[in-house]
Amino acid sequence: MEESMMQKGTEMPKVILYSYHLSSCSWRVRLALMLKGIDYEYKAINILRGQQFSEEFTKRSPFHTVPVLEIDGVTLVDSVAILLYLEERFPDKRPLLPKDLVQRAHIHQVVFLIASNIQPLQNTQILPVIEAKLGKEERLKWAQYSIAKGFSALERILEKTAGKYCFGDMVTLADVVLSPQLANAIRFQLDMAPYPTIQRVGQALNELPEVKASAPANQPDAPNL
Amino acid sequence: MEESMMQKGTEMPKVILYSYHLSSCSWRVRLALMLKGIDYEYKAINILRGQQFSEEFTKRSPFHTVPVLEIDGVTLVDSVAILLYLEERFPDKRPLLPKDLVQRAHIHQVVFLIASNIQPLQNTQILPVIEAKLGKEERLKWAQYSIAKGFSALERILEKTAGKYCFGDMVTLADVVLSPQLANAIRFQLDMAPYPTIQRVGQALNELPEVKASAPANQPDAPNL
């Protein structure tokens, strides 16, 4: 048995999420928390204004990144580590992974394809470096190339596994990570025509109330338009 | 209970690893298999000669990457998904994650720091693109910058958590992922002086027989020197 779970029992802990509305990694955690029905307090960190480098925030996250989750008396950084923690900590609150180990591995593959092979190549840490070295036009091309390369592999996977969502009709961690990445693809004006399965799953995900509620435009730090 | 485990029982399945000796992601899986005492057949894929794009290999991995693991009648791609599968499938064979959920989350953070924020920025997919756009000298600088940025965060984490290894004196998945990344850092001539804790842990890891046996030079496809 997991010691933390036994120690902490089943009462809901106080949860604080440090987030930036446009951060796709923050979105992953907002979406998982909402799908699992875990209430949380939202604290905005404006990463475009450099608030992630403040002394106070650096104590929380030596990565200088959002999201950061405070829960059970500890501070967790890295969105995927947070997703796995929430899944292990609250296994009965709308599971986002099935119990079968092979199915879990296939879902993990999609999570890491996006989290390790797409997102890091087009995030707010890397794109300014690309723009500084190669110019503004190359920035967009770089982002599009990075996403397209990953989406080509993802499309071939989802052709075989997708139902309504990435894996059959169950919303899983693969969907939790895909939804924000799709929004990035649209923001970077990627031609989605080569990825009909990704598009179809994305449309189904967009209809989920939790996807809408966790979207950047609906966060407390989104600009009033 | 996990269905796969119940179905497959405790007999050791036949395991085939598709690997390239210099691939740090392949090394992660070789090391985990050896630490857990799981025998496997080694099949070499020379990614510098493009064997990952062959029709036969593409059927196995739409990612065109190594490692690929065949086990339990399924094909798994993505090294971290494979590590998590092995851990869930063989929980009693030298566990590489503790049972405590918070400790697991901290170890996952280090795994993903390396697997999502360091390795993808300096691997054999990205460096040729950097060299083509910016030249050979920038290729090395880029690799060094990417590793140094991640190692700065990692050093601050390990200062607090390390014993003999990344987390106390237990060899965990954090060490499994760190060891190959350290070899990359040395290959890219990174100045390791700012990272004394990483260096110390790395030296302890290098003394493990499983680290030596899983190292690139000791693989069947390593050149005879």
Image (cartoon, coloured by chain):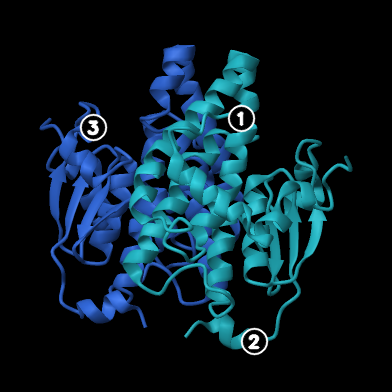
Chain colours: A blue, B cyan
- Furthest toward the right, the residue is B224
**Which label sits in the foreground, 2 or 1?**
1
| Type of the residue with mark 3 | Phe
| Residue A104 relative to residue A57: left or right | right
Residue type at tag 1: Phe
Given residues B147 and A31, the one toward you in this image is: B147
Give the number of the disc on residue B188.
Answer: 1
Circle 1 marks a residue in which chain? B
**Which residue is identified by label 3?**
A53
* Residue A21 percent across, percent down from the top left: 22, 40
Residue A57 in which image quadrant: top left
* Residue closest to the eye, B207 or A38: B207
Q: Amino acid at mark 2?
A: Thr
Are tags 3 and 2 found on a single chain? Answer: no
On residue A111, the disc is: none
Whichever of labels 2 and 1 marks the residue nearer the N terminus, that label is 2
Residue at mark 3 to residue at mark 2: CA–CA distance: 49 Å
Is residue B73 toward the left or the right of residue A105 in the image?
A: right
The residue depicted at 76 percent of the width and 74 percent of the height is: B14
Residue at disc 2, secondary structure:
loop
What's the distance in space between the residues labelled 2 and 1, CA to CA?
42 Å
B135 lies left or right of A223:
right
Residue plotted at (64% across, 46% down): B24
**What residue appears at the point 23 percent right and 39 percent down from the top-left corner?**
A58
Chain letter for the residue marked with disc 3 in the picture: A
Residue that carries the numbered disc 2 in the rendered image: B10
